Structure formats: structure tokens, C-alpha cells
Amino acid sequence: MDDKIGFPTQGEVLSYLFKAFGILPAKRDPRVDELEKKQFQRLLKRLRDEEGLLLKNFDIAVETFKTRLERNLSDPNARKVIINVLAELHHSYSRLLVEEGTYRSKVDTIGYFLFTRAISTFVEAVTFHLLRQRMLVHDDLICRKLSLLLPDLSDDGKIVWPLTKVIRWVYEQAGTSQRQFHLPGESSEKNWQNLENAGHWVRGEHMPSLPDLLANFSESLAAQGKTRSTPDGLMDAMPVMLTLARVSTAVCKDIVDAYGTDSLCRLLGILGSYFQGIGSEVEEFKAEISSYYEIDNIVDLPDQRWQFACSHFRRYLYNKKRESSETLKKLRFASPIQPFKPDVIDALSKRLGVYPVRSNLDPILDGGVIVKSGV
């Protein structure tokens, strides 16, 4: 992405999506027809350059993404959540294009989007769509998996990437070492190649394509049945976790390259606090549903009622965010020099909730920050 002032084109954003997921056909990928690869590369280039039938080409590219994701990730519920979250992020970015101008370079415009819109959009979308799938009914799935799917940053500057953490998690869940996992029983040339590739990936030396990553671990896990039993659910959970870890690693590495480790640390801190804040809203929602319907196990609620309740929860949270936004605007108007006094913000948070307040206040505080490393 160049330093030209403006917004990245929709085509540039979509091209990055394929790159982050690792599902853009490689030049020598035998699994995809050569003509198909060339045609799709040309289509992406036209989108990046904003040439031709933009809407039609955009729709074709989106459907291609969905097809490639389905080809690699068989879990329909996981795909549905991923697609819906990406759609909401795209909608948020489209609103930015319409509602605001920019004096920044493309890379700094994306940094502005990350801090002022993308984090809250991502947190809300993940929460709402997991909730609709009843994945946040009995335990806090987000916080339980979040530590695996985000990088660890140490004080000495070392980073442990999500892909490394999830690969090690797979070995731990399978009850094997890395060598035993990829070389179960009799060892073939393919097994040795899988072991060598996994070693590169876990050390962060290479970033695999999603098809190569999932094929390696699916083959190795399936072969475990010859020598030992595998934990229930690992075959289903592993592809989802590896996919999310691959995307998270790619995005976080690019954030470090573009804006520096300090900016990544700030983003992770905000992300964690937002998930914690919205988690409190979810727990309150679940308690109210249990009380209203007089049931102990809300997973037994009929789907139509559950979906209605989820929609009501979303409207309720957005109303609190809207009230918070209006209050913050009044505070800025009344006292431009020091509008957000800690005691006033604390009182507002107690009345409306921490998440509705912070998700409106943080973009105001971060909106003028240039996050590019060295600026």
C-alpha cells in the first residue's frame, strides 16, 4: 500500500482479505486451474485500480472468497460467523468513506480506522453473531479462546504469534509431542514433510497458505487413530482455531510492520477491555432472559424466541451507545478544554455501562493520533 493521501480502494481491502486468510491462489498451486487463477488475479487488479464494472467485480470477488473459505473450512456455523463479522467490518469501512474525508496516507487512514471504528465493530459483531449461534450461552467462549488467538508481547520485545500458540495447543490437546503428532507409527516422506513444515510455522519462519496448513494438520490428526485415540471435538475445533490463528497472525504482523509494536500493544489492550466490557453486557442479558422466561437453562429457549431476544439485546446496547455518544458531545460542548473529567466518566459508566461509554470515548481520544511507526 502506497503513501498516497486517500482511502485504500475497496479492491485493495478485498485483496488484503484474501492475503490475510491465505486463500489467494498461488502461481503454482495445482489445486486451481491456471486460467481461473489468471482471470481472478486480473479481476482483483481491476478492483484495486478501480477500473471496469466495480460493483459486479466486487460481488464476484466476494463470492469467490466465500467459495474458497467453504472449500477449506467445513464448519458452516464458523463460516457464517466469519462472513457476518467481515460484512460488518466492510460496512463500517464503507461508512467511513462516506462520512469522513482524510488528509492521511492510505496506511495511516487504515490506522485511523483501526482505532476509531474497527475495534468496536469487530467486538460487537463477534459477540452478537456468536450469541446468535448460542456459542456464548454457557461459558465465555471469547475470553477462553482470546488468549490463544492474540499474540503475546513480552517486555523485551519478543512476540509469540497466535499461529505458534494454536499449533502448540493442538499438540497439547492431542497429548503428543510435535514429532509424534506428525510422525505417528510408520513414517512416510509425506509425514516427514509435514513435520518439517510445521516446524517452520511454529517458529514463525514462514506463513503457510490456509489449504497447506489445514491439510497438514488434518492428515496428521487423522493418522493418530492408528496409534492412539484423539480427544472428542478436536477434529472439529482444530480447523477453526488454525484458520483464526492464521488470520490473526497475518493481521498482527502487518500492524507491527506498518505502525510498530507499541501500536499493536495498544490495540490489543483496547480489544481485551472491550471484550471484557461487552461480556458484562452479555451476562446481564442472559440473566434477564432466564428471569423473563423463568427457565434455568436458556439453551432450551426455542430458536425464534432466542433470535428475537438477541435482536432486542443488540438494539438495547446500541441505544445505550447512542445515549453515551450524545452525552459525550454535550460534555465537549460545555467544557471544550477539559470535557471528560474522570468522575463524570465514571458516573456515566455506572449508569450506562463501561462498554457503551468507552467504545465512544476512546475513538475521540485516539482519533487525532498518528499511529504510523516513527511519526
Image (cartoon, rainbow, N blue to C red):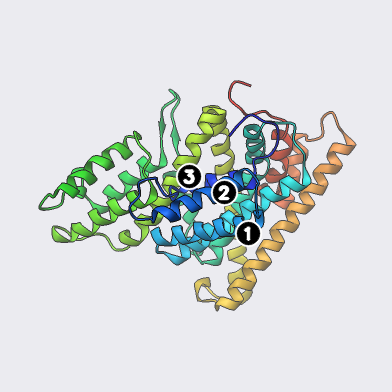
> Which SS class for mark 3?
helix
Pick whichever of labels 2 and 1 is earlier in the sequence.
2
The quadrant of the rendering that contains the N terminus is top right
Instruction: Compare residues 354 and 74 and report the one nearer the observer.
Output: 74
Q: In the drawing, does residue 110 fall left or right of residue 302?
A: right
The percent coordinates of residue 247 (x first, y second) are 46, 46
Q: Which residue is mark 1?
A: 56
Q: Position of residue 123 (x, y in %)?
A: 59, 50
The residue that appears at 37% across and 58% down in the rendered structure is 237
Quarter-of-image position of residue 313: bottom right
Above or below: residue 107 compared with residue 356: above
**Residue at left 48%, top 44%?**
19
The residue at which mark 2 appears reads as 14
Q: How far apart in space, not on screen, are marks 1 and 3 (Cα)?
A: 21 Å
Res 274 visible:
no
* Amino acid, disc 3: Lys
Image coordinates of residue 178 in percent, x first then y, are 22, 44
Residue that appears at 58% across and 71% down: 290
Nearest to N terminus: mark 3 or mark 2: 2
25 vs 15, left or right, is left
Label number found at residue 19: 3
Q: Is residue 266 left or right of residue 116?
A: left
Name the element at disc 1. Answer: helix
Q: Residue at x 50, y 60 (%)?
A: 66
The amino acid on which the numbered mark 2 sits, given as a three-letter code, is: Leu
